[in-house]
Amino acid sequence: MENGQLVQQSAGTAFDMWQKLAFTLVLISSFVILYQSKGFSKFVGNLKFYGKMSLTNYISQSIIGALLYFPFGLNLAPHCGYTVSLMIGIAVFLLQLMFCKWWLGRHKQGPLEYIWHKWTWLGSDK
């Protein structure tokens, strides 16, 4: 590879990384600005329940996805296109969100978060 091509490729990679960082900052700034309005903050306010049970949601999404799409489950992968898979993902998310609100109304934290907490402090005086 010639020196000019190497410099050009390296500069292109560096500019691409900076562009992605700048876009990320624009997205974060937009969210912060939008969150200051009451309507938007109320609209996304329920996501706090989902975030409090993030480990449980992550693991359960993997299990649900495997049962839906892999051959040992319903084997929907060959039959679902992008749009149907997106709709299934949104439905799973909404069901998880409803479960999170229900669970956190009765418990302090999610089931896997509780186990993680207990294992973290195993053998301590806490």
Image (cartoon, rainbow, N blue to C red):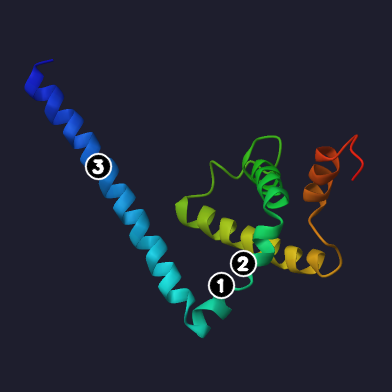
**Residue carrying label 1:** 44
**Contact? badges 1 and 2 (CB < 8 Å):** yes
- What residue type is disc 3 on? Asp
Query: Residue visible at 50% across and 79% down?
Result: 40
**Residue carrying label 3:** 16
Q: Position of residue 23 (x, y in %)?
A: 31, 55
**Residue carrying label 2:** 47
Q: Vertical placement of 51 versus 101: above or below?
A: above
Distance, label 1 to label 2, CA atoms, is 6 Å
The residue positioned farthest toward the top in the image shown:
1
Q: Secondary structure at mark 3?
A: helix
Relative depth, front residue between 93 and 6: 6
Query: Residue visible at 13% across and 15% down?
Result: 1
Disc 1: CA contacts within 10 A as few (<14), some (14-19) or many (>=20) = few
The number of numbered badges drawn on the structure is 3
Distance, label 1 to label 3, CA atoms, is 31 Å
Q: Secondary structure at mark 2?
A: helix
- What residue type is disc 1 on? Val
108 relative to 95 in the view: left or right: right
